[in-house]
Structures are given as C-alpha cells and as structure tokens.
C-alpha cells in the first residue's frame, strides 16, 4: 500500500513550518533548500509519495530534484 502525503509544505508556502536549527544547518550542508529537505524526508522510504503544488518553474525543478537526495543514518537520526 502506497501512502500519499498531501500538502507537504502545509499549503502555505512552507513558512508556517518551523524547522529546528539543526535541520536548517543540515539543508545548508547538503546544499539543498529546506523545501527539498522536507520532500526528501517524506520520500526517504520509497513507499510514501507526495504531491507538492507549485506555480513557480524554479520551485518545480527544485522539488523534482529532491527525489535524488539521500540521508545517512546519522542525518536521519537528526530528524528523529
Ligand atoms: N483532493 C484533496 O483533498 C487535496 C487536499 C489537499 C491538497 N491537495 C492537492 O495536493 C497538492 C498540494 O498543494 P497544497 O497547495 O495543498 O500544498 P503544498 O504543496 O504543501 O504547498 C504549496 C505551497 O508551497 C510553495 N512551494 C512549493 N514548492 C516550493 C519550493 N521549492 N520552494 C518554496 N516554496 C515552494 C508553493 O509556492 P509557489 O507556487 O510559489 O512555488 C505554495 O505556496 C495540490 O496539488 C492540491 O490540489 C488535494
């Protein structure tokens, strides 16, 4: 059974989602945006999909690229 995560950014540009400093730092270290970080985490198992909405071509490209982001066990522990 595949689960779909609707509204991965909370339907409000993602600004209402307060990421802790450790995860902001992780995004910087991985040279990705915090939106890509959030999407990559949702997609990390391969059995959860998500359907972000964007009206910005650059955001769409960024979101598609998040599919290729992977995490080490230590990085995943930061999310936990
Ligand atoms: N059928 C249902 O019951 C149901 C319920 C909920 C949602 N949905 C669908 O699920 C999808 C989710 O859309 P949603 O609007 O709810 O929520 P969302 O995808 O969580 O958030 C959309 C917001 O995130 C911004 N965004 C997207 N990518 C970004 C990026 N890389 N960097 C910065 N901002 C970014 C968008 O702005 P920009 O446009 O500026 O990129 C927009 O403001 C939609 O297709 C919606 O129709 C369906």
Image (cartoon, rainbow, N blue to C red):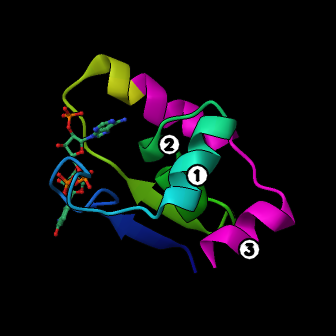
**Alpha carbons under labels 3 and 2: distance apart:** 18 Å
Residue at the (44%, 23%) spot, across then down: 61
> Circle 1 is placed at which residue position?
40
> Which residue is label 2 attached to?
36
Q: Is the residue 52 above or below the residue 16 in the image?
A: above
Residue at 53% x, 63% y is 42
Relative side of 13 to 62, left or right: left
Q: Is mark 2 within 8 Å of ligand 1?
A: yes
Q: Quadrant of residue 57?
A: top left
Identify residue for label 3. 77
Within the magenta stretch, is there residue 77? yes
What type of secondary structure mainly makes up the magenta span? helix
Residue 68 is covered by the magenta coloring: yes
Instruction: Look at the numbered discs 2 and 1 and tell me whether their residues touch, using CB distance below 8 Å.
Output: yes
How far apart marks 2 and 1 lie (CA) works out to 6 Å
User: Which is more foreground, mark 3 or mark 1?
Assistant: 3
Task: Please name which of the two marks, 3 or 2, marks the residue nearer to the observer.
Answer: 3
State how far apart marks 3 and 1 are (Cα). Answer: 14 Å
Left or right, 3 with respect to 45, comes to left
Magenta range is: 61-80
Disc with the residue nearer the chain's start (3 vs 2): 2
Q: Quadrant of the C terminus?
A: bottom right
């Amino acid at each position: 059974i595949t689960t779909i995560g609707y509204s991965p950014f909370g339907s409000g540009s993602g600004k209402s989602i307060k990421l802790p400093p450790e995860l902001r730092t992780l995004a910087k270290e991985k040279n990705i945006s915090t939106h890509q970080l959030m999407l990559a985490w949702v997609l990390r198992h391969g059995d959860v999909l998500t359907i972000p909405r964007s009206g910005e071509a650059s955001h769409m490209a960024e979101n598609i690229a998040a599919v290729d982001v992977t995490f080490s066990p230590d990085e995943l522990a930061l999310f936990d």
